[in-house]
Amino acid sequence: MTANQWQIGKIKITRVIEIEAFGGMRRILPDADYEAVKAIPWLFPHFADADGRLGASIHTLIVETPDCRIVVDTCVGNDKDRLVPAWNQLQTNFLSDFQATGYALDSIDRVLCTHLHVDHVGWNTRLQDGRWVPTFANARYLMGADEVAFWQAGSDDERFGPIYADSIKPIFDAGLVDLVSADHQVAPGVRMIATPGHTPGHVSVLLESAGETAFITGDMLHHPCQFARPHWCASVDHDKPQAIRTRTDIFERFADSPTLIIGTHFATPTVGHLVRDGDVYRLDV
């Protein structure tokens, strides 16, 4: 097992990083001021720096089972007009890094969107000859029916830019979307779990193979500090009380178990096991 690849029974998970850095997370987690972060000692050195700045990552996870290859979430994407300056008109090496893992873009069978926020759908499409085209042309794109209905009712998110127009609608236009329930079985050993709150149709992903399990969080939490402070909500959580209930239920479910927790925004080392820490929890890496 390396920092970017893990094995769960017969399922292999590979992480492809688009952006990883310390700092900037207080915009997302306003309660996580520097002194509050320093009061959680187990965050250091992996998930916070000496100044109390949180580390975070935007990455894709490639899940390979004996039956299919699945991409979970697709980051921010290049060439896109975004109102967050750090994400506007990105020019990263994401596609070449992706293919350097040994996975060709046209070898992907499924793209699973945990939800439809800006940093989870960007590489659904890429710019080609002035048009947005599917990045994974041979894949079916799985989107929660409730999640899509929520975003279609409001179209683009004015806080971030024309996300629906450039990263979601072209996939519908190409006929590649499958609308699925929040408990959809993606493949043998891979299924979605409803984890609402961050968005109404938000899902996480449970992997089960050969007696081993892993849980991909999505944005039911953004940073390991929320294991210690489950009441810390993201500024972009749609329903904050529900988000807290979801975290509490999931933490209780997986605490002190052998399930590997894989954070969708956790900085390297990204994974660990959830253990009880008094009345709250910590991530052991």
Image: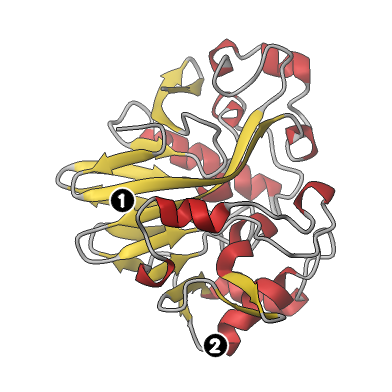
Residue 228 vertical placement versus 100 (above, below): above
- In the rendered image, residue 210, in percent from the top left (x then y), is placed at 14, 46
- In the rendered image, residue 45, in percent from the top left (x then y), is placed at 56, 15
Residue 265: image quadrant is top right
Find disc 2 in the rendering and name its residue.
174
Find disc 1 in the rendering and name its residue.
207
- Return the residue nearer the eye: 237 or 141: 141
Residue 82 is tagged as none
- In the rendered image, residue 98, in percent from the top left (x then y), is placed at 47, 54
From this viewpoint, which residue is outermost toward the left? Answer: 210
Q: Amino acid at mark 1?
A: Leu
Residue 243 vertical placement versus 267 (above, below): below
- Crowdedness of circle 2 by 10 Å Cα count: few (<14), some, many (20+)? few
- Report the side of 95 relative to 9 (left or right): right
Cα distance between the residues tagged 1 and 2:
29 Å
Whether residue 77 is visible, yes or no, is yes
Residue at image position (84%, 65%) is 158
- Return the residue nearer the eye: 244 or 97: 97
The quarter of the picture where the C terminus appears is: top left
- Report the side of 230 relative to 285 (left or right): right
Q: Amino acid at mark 2?
A: Ala
- Total marks placed: 2
Q: In what element is the residue under mark 2?
A: loop
